[in-house]
Image (spheres, helix red, strand yellow):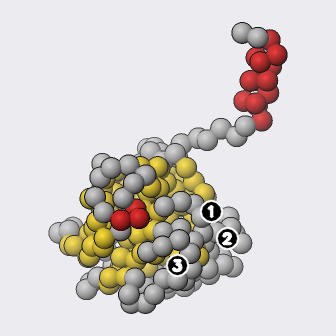
Amino acid sequence: MNPIYSMWLIFWLILTPQIKPIGIFENFEDIGNPKLKGSATFDPKSETYTLTGSGYNIWFERDEFSYLFNTMEGDFTLSADFEWVGEGVDPHRKTGWMIRSSTDDGAIHCSAVLHGDGLTVLQWRVAQDAMMRDPEDEIFAVNSHYKTLELERKGNTIIFRAAKEGGEMEEIGKHEMPALAGKVLAGLYINSHNPELTESIKITNVKIH
């Protein structure tokens, strides 16, 4: 190997940040440049993810949140159990699964949403930088305070199911998202619904298949 090339390669490896996987996830990022930065950890003994994040909201034409994700193609199903850490400050803090077109703050997305007060919703943004609308861009669950959230992509269709602890899985709703039919980002997220503070969630039984 050319010695000059070898030196350049070593120099590049030293200066280039190496992405370290967090559990089964390859990427972690604060979307929308929230004022307070988030974090993600994985405890291999308990197989528990702890996700901490801030952000004003995931709504209107732009989002702020912390995102732990992989790049995925084809049909897949995302499933996990969620447990908030502490009582929280804003009842509209939110967590769950998100399928997203990019890390841009106005990206197209479809999300399984569990709020701090138990409200459970399927929400989406239909186009880049589009204004999310209430109630046109969401489907509300009849019940609340679910433990397990499952988000499936099947072709162009995104299907949201949820179950209470020890209960049967219920279909919350489904929505056609042709803009999310190709290569996408898919993973866990948290938003505090208050840019001045962070919230945390414990996530277990994480499965992607």
Residue 138 vertical position relative to residue 156 in the rendered view, above or below: below
Residue sitting at 52 percent across and 45 percent down? 26
Q: CA distance from mark 3 to mark 1?
A: 20 Å
Label 3: few (<14), some (14–19) or many (≥20) C-alpha neighbours in 10 Å: some
Residue sitting at 44 percent across and 55 percent down? 184
Q: Is residue 84 something that shows in the picture?
A: no
The type of residue carrying mark 3 is Ala
User: Would you say the residues marked 2 and 1 are in contact, meaning their CB atoms lie under 8 Å apart?
Assistant: yes
Of the image marks 2 and 3, the number of the one nearer the N terminus? 2
Of the image marks 3 and 1, the number of the one nearer the N terminus? 1
Give residue 70's position: percent from left, percent from top: 47, 50
Q: Nearer the viewer, mark 2 or mark 3?
A: 3
Q: Quadrant of residue 20?
A: top right
Label 1: few (<14), some (14–19) or many (≥20) C-alpha neighbours in 10 Å: many
Q: Is residue 166 something that shows in the picture?
A: yes
Give residue 104's position: percent from left, percent from top: 60, 64
Mark 3, residue position:
130
